[in-house]
Amino acid sequence: MGKRGFEENAVVDEGFDQATGIHTSLSFEGDELITKKSWDAEPHLQHAAHARQSTAGKRWGEGRLIGHIPPAFYAQILVIKDKDERKKAVKCFFADNPAFIMFDRYKP
């Protein structure tokens, strides 16, 4: 007789990680374990939009920021050891997520 897994589905909610803002839950469905990770991008998008508006007209070196990388992604970038690869990962993040750019002239 083979393994059947759980008779009923079960969910373990691990809650939010304060450092990254990622919410994790684990689901046991039959003989499978499913990990679901999510985070709320809206506060980060609002922060980037507000910073873009409040620093409009400033030149580079006058307090302009290139962009905002949410902790969920920044943690992944920080573990890259090679400086050039880390810089490339930052550029890729902003190319894939232009709404987080806070300095319009930086847009790829």
Image (cartoon, helix red, strand yellow):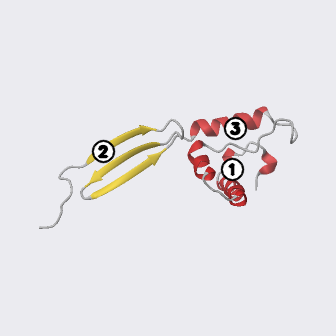
- Badge 2: residue crowd in 10 Å (few <14, some 14–19, many ≥20): few
Q: Given the image, on which type of amino acid does mark 1 rest?
A: Pro
Q: Nearer the viewer, residue 41 or 91?
A: 91
Work out whether 97 lies above or below 43.
below
Dots 2 and 1: beta carbons under 8 Å?
A: no
Name the residue furthest left. Answer: 1
- Badge 1: residue crowd in 10 Å (few <14, some 14–19, many ≥20): some
Q: Is mark 2 on a helix, strand or loop?
A: strand
Q: Residue at x 30, y 45 (%)?
A: 11
Determine which quarter of the picture holds residue 20: top right
**11 horizontally vs 83: left or right:** left
- Badge 3: residue crowd in 10 Å (few <14, some 14–19, many ≥20): some
Horizontal and vertical percent position of residue 10: 26, 46
Q: Which residue is drawn at 63% across and 50% down?
A: 78
Which of the two discs, 2 and 3, labels the residue nearer the N terminus? 2
Residue 11 got which mark? Answer: 2
Horizontal and vertical percent position of residue 33: 32, 55
**94 horizontally vs 105: left or right:** left
Residue position for label 1: 98
Q: Is mark 1 on a helix, strand or loop?
A: helix
Q: Which residue is drawn at 42% across and 44% down?
A: 24
Q: Is mark 3 on a helix, strand or loop?
A: helix
Q: Nearer the viewer, residue 14 or 43?
A: 14
Residue 49 got which mark? Answer: 3
Say which quadrant the N terminus sits in.
bottom left
